[in-house]
Amino acid sequence: MAVKKAVFREVGTAREPAVDSTIVNLRSKLEIYKSLSDGGNIADCPVRDVIQGLNGKWSSLLMAALAEQPYRFGELRRLVPDISQRMLTQTLHDLQRDGYVHREVFPTKPPSVEYSLTDLGRSMFGALHQLILWAELNHDAVRDARAGFDAAQG
Amino acid sequence: MAVKKAVFREVGTAREPAVDSTIVNLRSKLEIYKSLSDGGNIADCPVRDVIQGLNGKWSSLLMAALAEQPYRFGELRRLVPDISQRMLTQTLHDLQRDGYVHREVFPTKPPSVEYSLTDLGRSMFGALHQLILWAELNHDAVRDARAGFDAAQG
DNA sequence: AGAGGTGGTCTCAAAAAGAGACCAGCACTA
DNA sequence: TAGTGCTGGTCTCTTTTTGAGACCACCTCT
């Protein structure tokens, strides 16, 4: 099987000549992931620490929702029907702990709770959004790859 | 508590005026996550489907490693000491299935297996890398947020 | 009085991840 | 020739994470 023609689309259609931007090539990507100064042990790496907080099943979805507008607890639950109340509580708690989400209780009766992105959260979503955008543009390529792989492997 | 001054740094130091780039505001971010045309059910959303494959504990780390250069199985195991052989096999398998990673067996004795990024994988890493870069630049802000949260909540 | 909406917590089952033994095949060494 | 080690895995068992759903106090409206 020869090298397939690249049919996927890049996120930055213009002005981004290729995958590797200038800063990417400044030093080894793995070095960046190790984030230097970790004493040679890749296990406790700050970047891993931060990324870990985002790769939960619901984190990126809730970030995308809150990037749109602030939402109340129940609104988020209705917006994402297949999340359990337990995981919604927990994921929002974790996002708040990492400083991405602000939780505000309003003294209504019964009290309502509003979740919104902090400045840090908006900043982080700017980067996360690149990935979401890529996924939207290339989901059919990924789906094709999966289908091809499954067909080949049985 | 007033609105804190934003002390975190943006990834694109110049030319990116704020979090929201032009394309971000074209339509609702949540709409993008739903990726339209999903019949109103956010549960089976192509973007979620793609993102899901990347938020495993080891996926982004292995992508970063392979973005640096191709590696053999044992090399990856030594590079990431705290991954179990089982999860390394499985994660590489999943990344291969999604079309990000190419697996090639060389007929040496004993046979060796080399893993490398495909074009699709390199393209995806271009987006993922934004997030990694953000994490590197802002991990202290996240760490501070965590410390503050833990101190407040006990 | 009863139903419904608020934002949760608690318990228990299912799924995923981690630890480590085991495997075939070959090369090198003793 | 028997041991040792390296290759890339799989298999089983235990621990952690997630999911499903009951339960809760409080208030409002009917």
Image (tube, coloured by chain):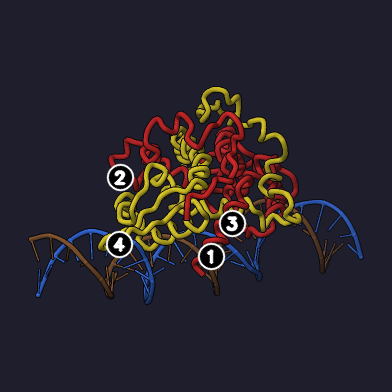
Chain colours: A yellow, B red, C blue, D brown
Chain letter for mark 2 = B
Residue at the disc numbered 3? B144
C18 or A120: nearer the viewer: A120
Q: How far across and down, in percent of the image, does residue A38 sit?
A: 72, 54
Asked which quadrant contains residue B35, the reply is top left
Local crowd size for mark 3, using a 10 Å CA cut-off: few (<14), some (14–19), many (≥20): some
Mark 3 to mark 4: distance in Å?
29 Å
Residue A144 visible (yes or no): no
Question: In the rendered structure, which disc, 2 or 1, sits on the residue that comes first in sequence?
Answer: 2
Residue at the disc numbered 2? B41
Q: Residue furthest top?
A: A14
Q: Amino acid at mark 2?
A: Asn
Residue A146 visible (yes or no): yes
Same subunit, labels 1 and 4: the answer reads no
> Residue at the spot x=58%, y=31% of the render?
A1
Residue at the disc numbered 1? B150
Q: Are marks 2 and 4 in contact (CB under 8 Å)?
A: no
